[in-house]
Image (cartoon, rainbow, N blue to C red):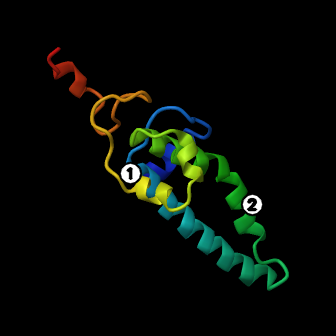
Amino acid sequence: MIDWYMTVLKKYAVFEGRSRRSEYWYFALGSGIISMILTFIDGALFGLEGVGVLSNVYSLAVLVPGIAVAIRRMHDVGKSGWFILIPFYNLYLTVQDSQPGTNEYGPNPKNPEYDMTDHLVD
């Protein structure tokens, strides 16, 4: 899980290409866990007046990587990144399997060496 989380952070503002389901969902899980821990620490350190300081700073820090991985996830299922703005349908798309082979956004991240279009007969 930590590897997927760090992969997203390393691709901080990469909006092109494709991301696997596991990359997207492990980042979401990791971010949720970190945010809950920081919210708990906020409450313990600052009381009710300061609740949210650490978790809000963290949320701002991972905002761009979160948007970037969501856009790459849309690309993986063959959709434009703008589909992250459509409620509920974007959730449906994030759980879909990758488009096999290479699409207009790049090679399949599950198996980039194998391109199904290489084996098609004209």
Disc 2: which residue: 57
> Which residue position holds label 1?
21
Please state, as top left, top right, bottom left or bottom right, where the C terminus lies in the image: top left
Residue 5 appears left or right of 103: right
Q: Residue at x 60, y 73 (%)?
A: 37
Q: Label 2, label 1: how many angstroms apart (C-alpha)?
A: 26 Å
Work out whether mark 2 precedes mark 1 in sequence or the reverse, and give the earlier one. 1
Where does residue 117 sit, x and y in percent of width and height? 24, 23
Kind of residue at disc 2 = Val
Where in the figure is residue 52, as x and y percent of width and height?
A: 75, 73
Task: State the residue lying farthest toward the top.
Answer: 122
Residue at 80% in and 85% down: 48
Give the position of the N terminus as an image quadrant: bottom left
Residue at x 47% of width, y 44% of height = 74
Crowding at dot 1, Cα within 10 Å, few <14 / some 14-19 / many 20+, comes out as: many
Q: Nearer the viewer, mark 2 or mark 1?
A: 1
User: Is 111 drawn above or below residue 33 in the view shown?
Assistant: above
Query: Residue shown at 21%/19% (left/top)?
Result: 118
Q: Residues within 10 Å of mark 2 (few under 14, many from 20)?
A: few
Percent x, y for residue 82? 58, 43
Residue 26 visible somewhere in the drawing: no
Q: Residue furthest right?
A: 49
